[in-house]
Amino acid sequence: MKKILVVDNQPLMLNFMAKLLEKNGYEVVTANDGLSALDCMETFEPDIIFSDLIMPNIDGEKLCRIIKSRPELSHIFLVILSGIAIEKDMDYTEFGADVCIAKGPFNQIEKNVLEVLEKLNSDAFVGFEKKIIGVEDIYRREVTVELLTVRKHSEVILSNISEGILELTSEKKIIFANSAAVSVIGISEEQLLGQDFENLFLGNHHSRIINLLSEIDGSPVEISEDLPVELNGKEVSMKLLPVNEEKHSAIIVIVSKISERKKLELQLQKARKMEAVGTLAGGVAHEFNNALIGITGNIELLKMDLPDYQPMDEYLKPMLASAHRMARLTKQLLAYAKGGKYRTCVISLNELIEETIMLTKHKISPTVRLETDIPSDEFYIEADLIQMQMVLSAIVANADEAIDGKGRIKISARIKDVDETFVEKLAGFKPGRYVCLIVQDNGKGMDDMTKSKVFEPFFTTYFHGRGLGLAAAYGIVKNHNGWIYINSEVGKGTVATVYLPAVETTKIK
């Protein structure tokens, strides 16, 4: 018994075709549009498909293209059963259909359908003539021609605009994609239609899209250019516009690629923001430092004037300890704000890592394993040793805090030649030969919003946070003509990479 799938958005036509075909010994399944047909074929593999041409949620033409593009479905015999066969100037073989039957009176449809099936089942079957069967039983309708012309105009407009346009069902499945959307996504239309929209995105971007789709409640939502998502390796902004009708709900997605010019603008804005914050932090730190000198100096004078007065010493000690903590905070602010005093010399990165590990390993959780992958070749940088130890310590401390329970932090070093292509998206970073210090953890990772703020002073994801560690690290690295980059995904850990200009020299004792 041959299996037949009938696809039509008219219940009366589905009922008529199901009864006709079952009466003639066929196993029949029906679907009311192209998307439903694709869902049916996950569990039902037809030998023949009868499909209407104009339908919501993937029309007959696109359904045929999708089926013929999939090797596992390409054997299916495709019959277009259309009510606009005479008005639509088309070559149905171009999109993969084998036969086209015009919809007319039911008795003529029955006759034509059975004749097609009889020829198809014949041992002498050699194919069909390239013509529309049954056109003599219908007449041309000018209203239909006009509506098809309007539809064609809309398709031309949508296919030639620069923004990507997608239409999603209420279940977030893709049922339309214009040429620009297909180009951005990098998947053929045949592969794209019927897919779940969120599955086009990876990692943090996938999570962001799922959250965004859940927020749609009759009002538009947007992903701005300031915090774009990544789609097929490209940064894009989006507008999602819900369409709520009595019989048809959908979501229109407008996708815009962020141009290289816009990317540079965003990088420059961020650099200027960090510069402004740094200037403010530097001013505050200098004033704060002056005040601290007065406090600590007067405390020491009191201790000198009253060395044996124990009751007062009980209060002076914690005051002095607090002042020293604030002095350390001031140094971090100055490091971020370019106000720190650096004593640079040529140092070995290998020794820097070894010495810093010795200083910091006792502060790391005992359940976290610290690993190193340092090449035997010596790498040299010109830097302030104490400041660089602060950078590495801050990154390791941040990695340790990101790990709940057992985990791993890996520190490695590499040489990398950075070219123009690599730095064009990073304002202020110059091409050259760099030593890369890499700290990788398998902690909980960060989302895009957290990642965009991680170098800001006092930003922390913890209720009680220090907030200056990575900000100070950012300032120190920038002041050494380097770059620090964070790559992270929620649930997949974080990789922090510090680029510092390499020095070509022999080891200095």
Image: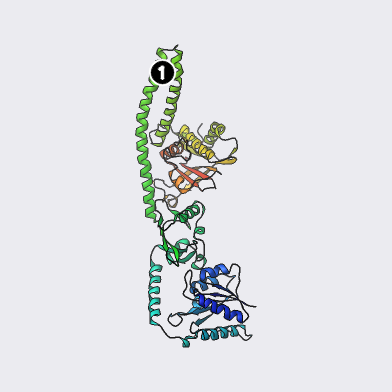
Asked where in the image residue 138 lies, by quadrant, the reply is bottom left
Q: Is residue 48 above or below residue 413?
A: below
Q: Nearer the viewer, residue 87 or 329?
A: 87
Q: Residue furthest bottom?
A: 136
Q: Nearer the viewer, residue 433 or 136?
A: 136
Q: Nearer the viewer, residue 287 or 422?
A: 287
Q: Estimate the x, y position of residue 60 in percent, counting from the top left.
A: 49, 74
Which image quadrant: the N terminus?
bottom right
Residue marked by disc 1: 300
Q: Estimate the x, y position of residue 448 in percent, counting from the top left.
A: 46, 48
Kindly tell me whether residue 391 is visible in this rendering.
Answer: yes
Q: Is residue 138 above or below residue 58?
A: below
Residue displayed at 37% across by 78% down: 146
Q: Residue furthest right?
A: 1
Q: Amino acid at mark 1?
A: Glu
Q: Is residue 266 above or below residue 15?
A: above
Residue displayed at 54% across by 79% down: 16
Asked where in the image residue 294 lies, by quadrant, the reply is top left
Q: Estimate the x, y position of residue 411 in percent, counting from the top left.
A: 55, 40
10 Å crowding of disc 1: few (<14), some (14-19), many (20+): some
Q: How many marks?
A: 1
Q: Estimate the x, y position of residue 167 in percent, counting from the top left.
A: 45, 64
Q: Residue furthest top?
A: 308
Q: By what rule are the colours in the image chosen?
A: rainbow
- Assign a secondary structure to mark 1: helix
Kindly tell me whether residue 374 is visible in this rendering.
Answer: no
